[in-house]
Image (cartoon, rainbow, N blue to C red):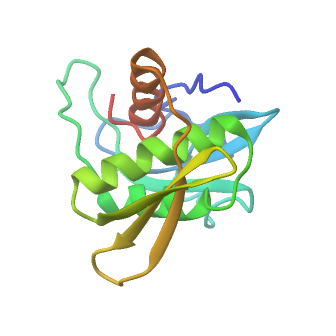
Amino acid sequence: MDYQIQPNSRRCAVTGRDLQVGERYFSALVEEDRQFVRKDFSVEAWVGPPTDAVSFWTGRVQAGTEKVRPRFDDDLLEDCFQRLQGETEPGRINFRYVVALLLLRRRRLRYESSVLVDGAEKIMLTHMGTGAKHEVVNPRLSDAEMNEVQDEVFRVLGWK
């Protein structure tokens, strides 16, 4: 799977109307032709997330000259993590793994153990709030691959 996600388009995917600075918008991450694509929607055109959405969030259009400091939205990370559960496509496994690491760092998940199953490492995690157990495949990414996937997660979620 390719992760070339565009930044906020500043244009409503439904109406084609330009979104104005300061205006609230919704974004959804959907898969099209084996790629994650970000779609932005005006408040008026938003009727909820598309049925094929991997994740969705809201924000405000920033002025092009404003320096935007990333705001980590833990709920958005968790939603993305949950929606990718059970995926078998390598790109999605990589994406979910990096999201899991971010959730560990944000103390939303706790590491319990890791096991080797048929040559693949699976990491067992517990959600700190609900106690729910999660299993995450460790795709054994190189440092360069890890940085690339992490950059894509940040770009997809609008943090970079």
Near-viewer residue (136 or 152):
136
Near-viewer residue (145 or 111):
111
Is residue 11 among what the camera can see?
yes
- Residue 149: give x, y in percent of width and height: 48, 28
The answer to whether 70 appears left or right of 78 in the picture is left
The residue at the point 32 percent across, 47 percent down is: 102
- Residue 37: give x, y in percent of width and height: 64, 35
Q: Quadrant of the N terminus?
A: top right
Near-viewer residue (104 or 121):
121
Is residue 16 among what the camera can see?
no
Q: Please, is residue 18 above or below residue 51 in the view?
A: above
The residue at the point 28 percent across, 42 percent down is: 22
- Residue 85: give x, y in percent of width and height: 61, 61
The answer to whether 107 appears left or right of 92 in the picture is left
Place residue 77 in its image quadrant.
bottom left
Near-viewer residue (55 or 16):
55
The residue at the point 50 percent across, 28 percent down is: 141
How many numbered discs sit on the rendered protein?
A: 0
Q: Quadrant of the C terminus?
A: top left
The residue lying furthest to the right in this view is 33
Q: Please, is residue 56 above or below residue 138 in the view?
A: below
The answer to whether 77 appears left or right of 138 in the picture is left
- Residue 61: give x, y in percent of width and height: 34, 38
Q: Please, is residue 87 above or below residue 32 in the view?
A: below
The residue lying furthest to the bottom in this view is 130
